[in-house]
Image (tube, grey):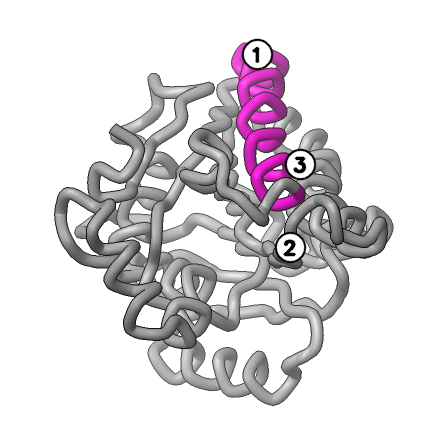
Amino acid sequence: MQTDFRGSTVLVTGGTRGIGRALVDAFADAGANVAFTYRSSTDAAEALVDQLEGRGTEALSLQGDVADLEAAQDHVDAVMDRWGSLDVLVNNAGITRDGLLLRMSEENWDDVIDTNLKGVFNFCKAAYMPMMRQQRGAIVNISSVVGTTGNAGQTNYAASKAGIVGFSKSLAKELGSRNVTVNVVAPGYVQTDMTEELDADARESILDAVPLDRLADPDEIANAVLFLASPAADYITGHVLHVNGGLSM
């Protein structure tokens, strides 16, 4: 996708793998200054910064847990200190702890809600005032098709991803008058490390349910995010863009 983000500053949570990595690369290719968070893979984060800077991109890696509000504020402050603005925030970080509700532990419920939903709250709260002061900005939160359709064994994940939708629509109403948009991208099944681990039967079952008969490439999710973060989408807010190959029809 050819979109010009030169002069813009972008913060992506969970930026070292999968969709997050595709987002970091896509915004860098579009000319943005890119900051990304990661939790534990310091070597991967350092390698990514080196790669981005080798391509002429100003990059910043930020280690911490997205479920920690203080860390989220520190990360946004670091972006503001480095570049003086935060133009785009993409809340991508997420985890799964699957299991039937009957056997789901409270810890596995809390971990998913804290990372996937509270993490979005934390970073949006930290970015709220900087974007209001700028009177411009774009927030794109990553949900999931499961937040709409549900999925057995994923009550915690589905609840977190459905919560992102309601949260984002409400925040869009709060920030609209300050020229800040808030939108959601809801992917279906994406070709990532997680789906690589599926056995042949599970993969075939997924593909049978997808009208386009394939998994998404992470770059296809990134393209949708770049569109919603770009000036081309300045009059779109509170929207949920489903990128799932027709899975939720």
Q: Upstream in the sequence, badge 1 or badge 2? A: 2
Q: Which residue is drawn at 84% across and 55% down?
A: 107
Near-viewer residue (20 or 215): 215
Q: From the viewer's perspective, is the residue at label 2 or at label 3 nearer?
A: 2
Amino acid beneath label 3: Cys
Q: Which residue position is annotated with label 3?
A: 124
Please state, as top left, top right, bottom left or bottom right, where the C terminus lies in the image: top left
Q: Which residue position is annotated with label 2?
A: 99
Q: Give the range drawn in magenta.
A: 156-178
Q: Which residue is drawn at 66% across and 36% down?
A: 124
Question: Crowdedness of circle 1 by 10 Å Cα count: few (<14), some, many (20+)?
Answer: some
State the SS at label 3. helix
Q: Is residue 193 above or below residue 188?
A: below
Q: Upstream in the sequence, badge 2 or badge 3? A: 2
| Magenta stretch contains residue 238 | no
Query: CA–CA distance between discs 2 and 3?
Result: 29 Å
**Disc assigned to residue 173:** 1
Q: From the viewer's perspective, is the residue at label 1 or at label 2 nearer?
A: 2
